[in-house]
Image: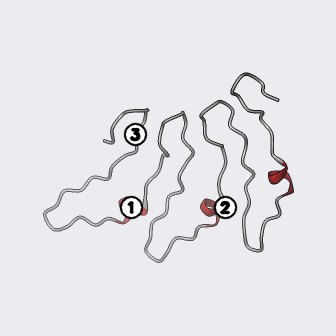
Amino acid sequence: VEVAPGVTLEAESSYHADYTAKKGESFVLMKVAVAPGLPLGGGSSYHTDYTAKRSEAYSPMKVAAAPGVPFEGESTYHADYTAKKGEAYSPMKVAAAPCVPFE
């Protein structure tokens, strides 16, 4: 049943309710989107269980705050990049609003 046209119920599917985590796997229940076009809120087991490789910086991605807004976070490319001699380097930031280009 829909709360309003196009808005899904805030609930769990039977998949989520019945899921049993595999050995060594962390499982975080995903919540149903609260408005059309908004991604699910929650973390994947990839983000939860990820172990950074030696000398690799890892910053978990956050779910977008509004439709069309990209994920907030840094890639390991940005975190690990070392500027070449004489090269100015400033990490790119993720756009803060839809249709706003990267800074």
Examine the rendered structure and indicate whether residue 28 appears above or below residue 51.
above
Extreme residue in the bottom direction: 54
Residue in view at x 57 percent, y 71 percent: 51
Residue at which label 2 appears: 45
Tell me the amino acid under the disc marked 2.
Ser
Q: Quadrant of the C terminus?
A: top left
Q: CA distance from mark 3 to mark 2?
A: 25 Å
Examine the rendered structure and indicate whether residue 6 appears above or below residue 12.
above
Residue in view at x 63 percent, y 31 percent: 36
Q: Quadrant of residue 5?
A: top right
Q: Secondary structure at mark 2?
A: helix
Please state the horizontal and vertical placement of residue 60, each as a whole percent of the image. 54, 56
Please state the horizontal and vertical placement of residue 14, each as a whole percent of the image. 85, 49
Q: Earlier in the sequence, mark 1 or mark 2?
A: 2
Examine the rendered structure and indicate whether residue 24 appears above or below residue 86.
below
Tell me the amino acid under the disc marked 3.
Ala
Q: Disc number at residue 16?
A: none
Tell me the amino acid under the disc marked 1.
Ala
The foreground one among 97 and 7 is: 7
The foreground one among 62 and 69 is: 69
Residue at which label 3 appears: 95
Q: Quadrant of residue 83?
A: bottom left
How would you rate the neighbour count of disc 2 (Cα within 10 Å): few for under 14, some for 14-19, many for 20 or more?
some
Examine the rendered structure and indicate whether residue 27 appears above or below residue 25.
above
Q: CA distance from mark 1 to mark 2?
A: 22 Å
Residue at which label 1 appears: 79
Cβ–Cβ below 8 Å for labels 3 and 2?
no
| Left or right placement of residue 18 versus residue 102 in this view | right
Residue in view at x 65 percent, y 30 percent: 35
Cβ–Cβ below 8 Å for labels 1 and 3?
no
Residue in view at x 43 percent, y 32 percent: 98
